Amino acid sequence: KAGVTQTPRYLIKTRGQQVTLSCSPISGHRSVSWYQQTPGQGLQFLFEYFSETQRNKGNFPGRFSGRQFSNSRSEMNVSTLELGDSALYLCASSPGPGQGSSHTQYFGPGTRLTVL
Amino acid sequence: AQSVTQPDIHITVSEGASLELRCNYSYGATPYLFWYVQSPGQGLQLLLKYFSGDTLVQGIKGFEAEFKRSQSSFNLRKPSVHWSDAAEYFCAVGPPLNSGGYQKVTFGTGTKLQVIP
């Protein structure tokens, strides 16, 4: 099976702009989680989607949003970018509740976002 | 609420030496437990996981971890470290298989491993 893919891999934006990141989970996986990773804060949970519905949300401002499509692909959007949003954004897919190994997450390579 | 503690932020070992990375968790029941490894600028790769059964779990790249319920620990070990093992290691905890719901997986803060020749 193909792994988790994330696009784009690298992105440079300026303050105030918005950005959309994409994640395609492993085939058959229905749950997608997003994480922000920075040297100072480590790995922080953003949100999780299952069956097109947000199931869990981390402690991030409303500028961070996401969605999941019927084919389980997910996007996350950050509006009004700030310098502190510079980070590696990781997507992880898992089978989802009720399925074998439901919480085993498989990560994509990440999108490196730089805000200037 | 579930939590994971990795008490060692940074560890340095000599190539060929043994390795043990510590992980302690807090959870009401026996959760799912995971170890991941991350090379610089890359995503996280699953090393091994524990759900139930044998408390000694074998993973990829020669790693193993032992679940100790009495100590709420899930330490990662490797008998002989290679230079290519230098990376950051994350312990994670998720809800048990029969817990239902959508409780999220919680990650520790990571342990950076440096390997010296």
Image (cartoon, grey):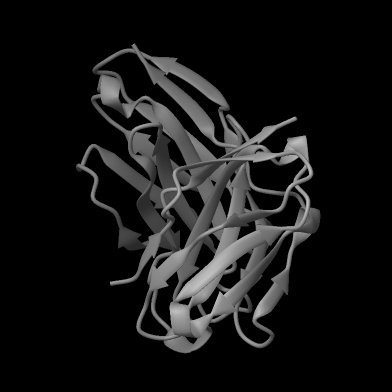
The quadrant holding residue A15 is: top left
The quadrant holding residue B75 is: bottom right
Q: Nearer the viewer, residue A41 or A104?
A: A41
Q: Is residue A81 visible?
A: no
**Which quarter of the image is occupied by the N terminus of chain A?**
bottom right
A116 w.r.t. B87: above or below: above
* Residue at the image point whose x is 49% and y is 48% from the top: A74
* Residue at the image point whose x is 75% and y is 39% from the top: B15
* Residue at the image point whose x is 51% and y is 38% from the top: A22
Q: On the picture, is A42 further left or further right than B82?
A: left
Q: Is residue A113 visible?
A: yes
Q: On the picture, is A47 further left or further right than A112?
A: left
Q: Nearer the viewer, residue A70 or B19?
A: B19
* Residue at the image point whose x is 45% and y is 49% from the top: B8
Q: Position of residue B110 (x, y in %)?
A: 47, 47
Q: Nearer the viewer, residue A27 or B95?
A: B95
Q: Position of residue B99 (x, y in %)?
A: 43, 85
**Which quarter of the image is occupied by the C terminus of chain A?**
top left
